[in-house]
Image (spheres, rainbow, N blue to C red):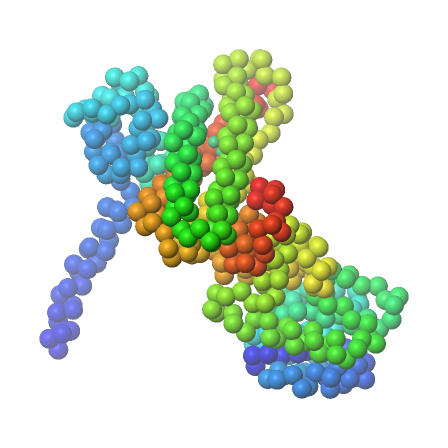
Amino acid sequence: MIQKRVKKSLRPTFIRVFLSLPKIWVMQVFSKNDKMVHLVQANHNLLPVIHRFGIRLGFGNKTVEELCFDYEINSDFFLAIVNTFHNKNFFPKDQLLAFSPLLLVDYLKKTHQYYVDYSLPRIEKLIHRLLMSTPKQNSEMQMIEKFYLAYKKKLLEHFDEEEQEVFPIVEKLVLHPDQVADKNFDANFEKEHEHVDFELDDLKNLILKYLVPEYDELICNKLMEEIYHFERDIHDHSRMEDAILIPQMTQLLRAAE
Amino acid sequence: MAKSIVIIHPAEIIRKGISSLLEDIQSVRISCFPDFSKLNMQELKAAQKLLLIVPANCRYAQELLELRTSIGEHELVGVLTNDKEKCEDNAFDHLIPIDVPAKQLIQIAEGFFESDDTDNSGELTIREKEVLRLIALGNTNKTIADTLFISTHTVISHRKNITEKLGIKSIPGLTVYAIIQKIVGPSDISPDQLS
Ligand SMILES: [Fe+2]
Ligand SMILES: [Fe+2]
């Protein structure tokens, strides 16, 4: 009897907690009046994103709006990028489509640069060091490094294709639409992006499931952290290309016809 | 019933003949039907593994398609009554002439029922390892099917199982796994197999 009563009296609280949890958890959408430092404190993965916009540390207590003003950045665009990066389920497609494609192209180029200059070489170095820490006689493990190098080569070719073919066309379509000769240009990278996802996932599984037990754990921790960070970043990047840039380009091509 | 063999053939002599050849296979239930309309679908759906033996004849293509989409794990054996018979050979996992040696038919049936006994362990079966080896060597589904005398349909289903068990989706990833597990040697792989 007593047990029953206790349960009953607890129930409303449970329901309240349960109902309020998703709101706090799932969506944390930053706004112009948030302090920039607060963004990084909430999610340190945002720091590279902030850097891509050219914003440097030394935020002080300045808000997003104030810093964007100082650096001459479109604060709405900045927030849209930061918020989609921060929340998996936040993707204001219409709002993103409405920004100038030039803003997005610029951001995507800087993101490529970050991968090429930082993420990819760092993962490469850590894989190499990890495998050097495993017993030499297990030469099969070296295949993981070969796998990664082949993956990286394909990815760089993909970036190249986007930078040589897609980005310039988008820029031209905005700035000088009359100079675009080929108006039937057709680009779709969804398949390629899917492959990028798959192979990165395979890399993780090959290491997590099939690495020999003798290895340097500190290097391994760092490597996995780097791979997860990169995976998250490039996933967001590819989504911007598939869902925003390519539709914007198609739209511009149609308008230029 | 966990394992079933279903023989569908209009000729009683063929039904009975095949049935008596296969009756010694352990813990497998055999049932025979003269045509598709007499099938007990409840029973077929309840079977965990099903070996279907049917005439390799285009006349039944529609019935077969319907049947195959509504049952679980199965392989399809087509029986050719004469050389001139027209059939879609890609639709079958095995095609056997009516004068097939008894031993070969028994091998097909035993191979099928033995193959996936360790299914829940996440370990690859012998057949799956064989398919994986051929993938790592750079073969297409079609070549793998021809090499192992199975349909491309079955190759694809093996690939799906391999990927699910290993958590590895790409061909380069599967190739590296095959090398790590010593299913193939690093020197057997062509350099562009990873790209
Ligand atoms: Fe890109
Ligand atoms: Fe891309």
**Foreground pick, A33 / A140:** A140
Q: Residue at x 59, y 56 (%)?
A: B184
- Between B149 and B9, the one lying in front of the other is B149
Quarter occupied by the N terminus of chain A: bottom left
Q: Is residue B147 left or right of residue B164?
A: right
The total of numbered circles placed on residues is 0
Q: Quadrant of residue B14?
A: bottom right
Q: Left or right? Give the position of A231 relative to B151.
A: left
- Residue at 66% x, 69% y is B75
Give the position of the C terminus of chain A as an image quadrant: top right
Q: Residue furthest left?
A: A2
Could you tell me residue A235's position as x and y percent?
43, 39
Residue B154 appears at what percent x and percent y?
Answer: 65, 62
Instruction: Please say if B164 is above or below A200.
Output: below
- Relative to B117, is A150 above or below? above
Q: Answer yes or no: is residue B150 visible.
A: yes
Q: Quadrant of residue B178?
A: bottom right
Q: Position of residue A229 (x, y in %)?
A: 36, 40
Residue B104 is situated, as x and y percent measured from the top left of the image, at: 74, 75
Q: Is residue B68 left or right of residue B116?
A: right
The answer to which of A78 and B123 lies nearer the viewer is B123
Query: Which residue occupies 48% across, 29% down?
Result: A245
- Quarter of the image holding residue B79? bottom right
From this viewpoint, which residue is outermost toward the front?
Answer: A137
**Residue drawn 15% across the image and 73% down it:** A4
Q: Is residue B166 left or right of residue B97?
A: left
Above or below: residue B14 compared with residue B84: below
Question: Looking at the image, can residue A65 be seen?
Answer: no
